[in-house]
Image: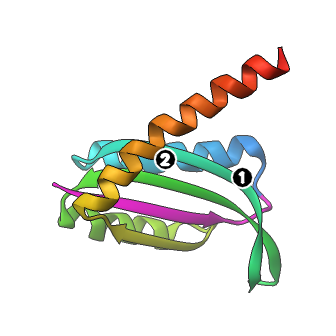
Amino acid sequence: MKDYELMVIFTPVLSQDEYKAEAKKLTAFLGENAGTVVKENFWGLRQLAYPIQKKTTALYYVLEFQATPDTISKLLVQLNRTESVMRQMITSLDKHAVAYNARTKGAGKKEETVNENVEA
């Protein structure tokens, strides 16, 4: 199995619950097709660099996972069939990118705990 990163741009018309449900469908699809989710990151509503389908904002979702190349082709078909997906990009990660993501995964958790302590 190889390491991949998937970035999906969902239409901004989705509610927060619909956005989370679409992301859950993707992780469930990977689970059904022998894929393993390593990390998921909800970026939320962001400004687009250029309009897509006459929209200037979109909901971003980033997923790091492990899967076979056969699963990637099935995932692309699934993403192309989903109407709420405006754009998607699947990137194959090398060993250096995986190591970097593992290092930054722990750093993000430390920042969250520090911020929680400051707010309290």
Between 99 and 81, the one nearer to me in the picture: 99
Q: Is residue 17 above or below residue 70?
A: above
Question: Which quadrant of the structure image shows residue 48?
Answer: bottom right
Q: Position of residue 32 (x, y in %)?
A: 29, 44
Residue placed furthest toward the left? 1
Q: Position of residue 116 (x, y in %)?
A: 74, 21
Query: Looking at the magenta stretch, what is its main secondary structure?
Result: strand
Q: Which residues are magenta?
A: 1-13
Q: Is residue 88 above or below residue 42?
A: below
Please identify the quadrant where the C terminus is shown: top right
Tell me: 120 left or right of 106. right
Q: Position of residue 73 (x, y in %)?
A: 28, 71
Q: CA distance from mark 2 to mark 1?
A: 17 Å
Q: Position of residue 74 (x, y in %)?
A: 30, 66
Secondary structure beneath dot 2 equals helix
Say which residue appears at 51% left-offset and 64% top-offset. Answer: 7
- Tag of residue 25: 2
Say which residue appears at 78% left-offset and 48% top-offset. Answer: 15
Task: For the residues labelled 2 and 1, say whether their Cβ atoms are less than 8 Å apart.
Answer: no
Amino acid type, residue under disc 2 in the picture: Lys
Tell me: 68 left or right of 43. left
Mark 2 or mark 1, which has the lower sequence index?
2
Q: Is residue 101 above or below residue 51?
A: above
Which residue has dot 1 on it? Answer: 44
Number of numbered callouts drawn: 2
